[in-house]
Image: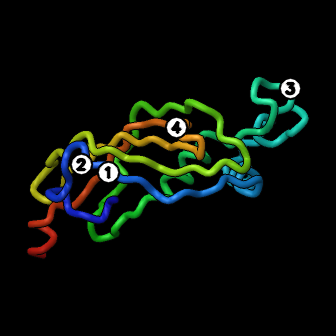
Amino acid sequence: MFDRYLEEYEINESWTSRGRTITESDIVMFSAFSGDWFPLHTDEEYAKKTQYSQRIAHGMLVLSVATGLLHFEPDIVVAFYGMDKVRFIKPTYIGDTIHLELNVNDVNVKNSSQGVVTAHLEVKKQTNEVVVAAQMKLLINREMVTKND
């Protein structure tokens, strides 16, 4: 989705990613990398006694995997600019397949060479339930500046 110059984005345009299945290995590797070994994610016996009845993926793992489903063109995307209103709405279980749906909310010129694209992001699983929602912002190059360089 993020492979076009700022001027090429339109309010309300949408995009859907491919899917990706969350595995037990994802959870173990994310726990090791982040240091987050909370038992709801890593202890099957503990998780059985919770409202979820099984282990769930870390919310930040799901969000991280989802951003990996995006396409960023290096000469166009300057940087990840931030996220607002991040909500972890439903659990993602081992074996769930997630995908990302984006809808452009705002295109804002920041200066003569760049602007910010804001998109509503929803991570959905195979049941079409939203598991994560947020407002994502990316700093994008403007076409006229990049082509003149």
Report the disc number at residue 49: 3
Q: Are marks 1 and 3 in contact (CB under 8 Å)?
A: no
**Gap in angstroms between the C-alphas marked 4 and 1:** 18 Å
Dot 2 alpha-carbon crowd within 10 angstroms: few under 14, some 14 to 19, many 20 or more: many
The residue carrying mark 1 is 138
Confirm or deny contact between disc 4 and disc 1 (CB under 8 A): no
| First-in-chain label (1 vs 2) | 2
Looking at the picture, tell me which residue is in the foreground, 27 or 15. Answer: 15
- Position of 133 with respect to 136 (left or right) is right
Residue 114 image position (x, y, % from top left): 18, 56
Label 4 belongs to which residue?
132
Q: Quadrant of the C terminus?
A: bottom left
Of the image marks 2 and 3, the number of the one nearer the N terminus: 3
User: Which numbered disc, 2 or 3, marks the residue closer to the eye?
Assistant: 3
Q: CA distance from mark 2 to mark 3?
A: 44 Å
In this rendering, which labeled residue sits more in front, label 4 or label 1? 4
Instruction: Identify which amino acid the numbered label 3 is placed on.
Output: Lys
- The local secondary structure at tag 3 comes to loop
Q: Secondary structure at mark 1?
A: strand
Amino acid on which disc 2 is placed:
Val
Tag 4: amino acid: Val
> Mark 2 or mark 4, which is nearer to you?
4
User: Which residue position is annotated with label 2?
Assistant: 116
> In the displayed structure, would residue 37 be above or below residue 113?
above
